[in-house]
Image (cartoon, rainbow, N blue to C red):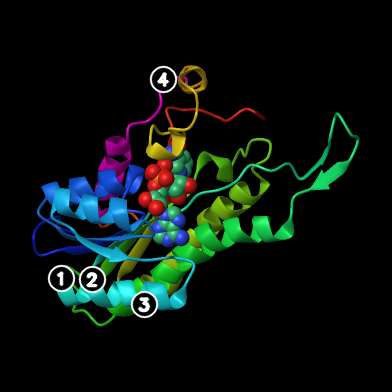
Amino acid sequence: MKIDSSLAAVVTGGASGLGLATVKALRAGGVQVAIFDLNEETGEKAAAETGAVFCRCDVLSDDSVDEAFAKARAAHGQERALVCCAGGGNAIPTARRDKATGKINIFPSDKFEWVLRLNTVGTFRCITRAAAGMMTLEPIDGERGVLVNTASAAASEGQMGQAAYSAAKAGIVGMTLTIARDLSREGIRVNTIQPGIFATPAMKGAPQQMLDALGAMVPFPQRLGHADEYASLALEIIRNGYMNGETVRLDGAIRMQPR
Ligand SMILES: NC(=O)c1ccc[n+]([C@@H]2O[C@H](COP(=O)([O-])OP(=O)(O)OC[C@H]3O[C@@H](n4cnc5c(N)ncnc54)[C@H](O)[C@@H]3O)[C@@H](O)[C@H]2O)c1
C-alpha cells in the first residue's frame, strides 16, 4: 500500500509513545491521520503538532469507538490503514504470601479481565469497525486495507506479575492469523508487532538505574528500543503487500527473564 496523501489512517493510542511515533512517521509521508486516544490533553496536543485529527476514543467502549471512526471518516474519508497501539497492563502476582503477615493475596479477577478487555478486546473492537469500513472501498492493486496490532515480548515470556498482560498480548498474537484468514477474501491484511522494551512515556515512571539495567539485558543493540524504530516497522507492514498473518518481534534479540 502506498504511503502518501491519498491514504487515510487511524492510530489508536496515538497520543503517546509507539502510537505517536507512528503518527509522526505517517504524517511525514503525507498520510491523513486520525489519532484515537483516551487522553484528550495529550491527544489534542499531538494532533496540533503533527497536523493529525484527534478523536477522543476509549477502546473499551463500542459507542466511543464508533463515534471516533465517524469523526475520523468525516474528516479524511474511509481509512485504509489501522495501527492499534492503545494498551497497557498491571503487575500483580497470581497468588502471593505477604512476608510480614503471612496473608495470601490473589490476583483479583476484575483486574485480570480489565487488561484483556483493554488490549485484546479493545484491539479486536477497532479491527472489526475498520475492516467493515474497508470492505466498502474499491481495492487498489487488489488490496482494500491493512491492520497493524501491537503485542509484546510478554506474549512469549511474561515476567512475574504479568499473567494478565501476557494473556492479553498472547491473545493478540493468537488472533492475528485467524483474522488474516477471515479477511483474506476482502483483500485486507493483518500483522502484529511484538515489541521488546521501548523507551516511551509508559516507562518514564521507572528509575534510570532500572532502565539502564533493562537496556543492558538486550543482546544487541544494548539499549531500549526507540519509538521511531517501531514506527518504521509499522510503515513497512503497511507498505509491503505480501506481508500478512504474521507476528514480528522487534526487540534486539532480548528474551525476558522471570523478573
Ligand atoms: N513501551 C514498551 O516497552 C512496550 C513494549 C511492548 C509492548 N508495548 C505496547 O505498545 C503499546 C503502546 O505502548 P507505549 O509504550 O507507547 O504506551 P504509552 O502509555 O506511551 O501510550 C499508550 C497510549 O494509549 C492510550 N490509551 C490507554 N488506554 C486507552 C483506552 N482505553 N482507549 C484509548 N486509548 C488508550 C494512552 O492514553 C496513551 O496515549 C501498548 O499496547 C503496550 O502494551 C509497549
Q: Which residue is mark 3?
A: 66
Camera-near label (4 vs 2) is: 2
Q: Which residue is mark 4?
A: 220
Q: Given the image, on which type of amino acid does mark 1 rest? A: His
Q: Real-space Cα distance between discs 3 and 1?
A: 15 Å
Q: Residue at x 69, y 43 (%)?
A: 92
* Ligand 1 closer than 8 Å to label 3 CB: no
Q: Given the image, on which type of amino acid does mark 3 rest? A: Asp
Work out whether residue 127 can be spotted: yes
* Ligand 1 closer than 8 Å to label 4 CB: no
The picture quadrant where one finds residue 25 is top left
* Ligand 1 closer than 8 Å to label 2 CB: no
Q: What is the x, y in percent for residue 37?
A: 35, 59
Q: Given the image, on which type of amino acid does mark 2 rest? A: Ala
* Ligand 1 closer than 8 Å to label 1 CB: no
Q: Which residue is mark 1?
A: 76
Q: Residue at x 64, y 35 (%)?
A: 159
> Residue 72, labelled with which disc?
2
Label whose residue precedes the other's in the sequence (3 or 1): 3
Check if mark 4's residue and mark 2's residue have beta carbons within 8 Å: no
Q: Real-space Cα distance between discs 3 and 2?
A: 10 Å
Check if mark 1's residue and mark 2's residue have beta carbons within 8 Å: yes
Q: What is the x, y in percent for residue 51?
A: 13, 55
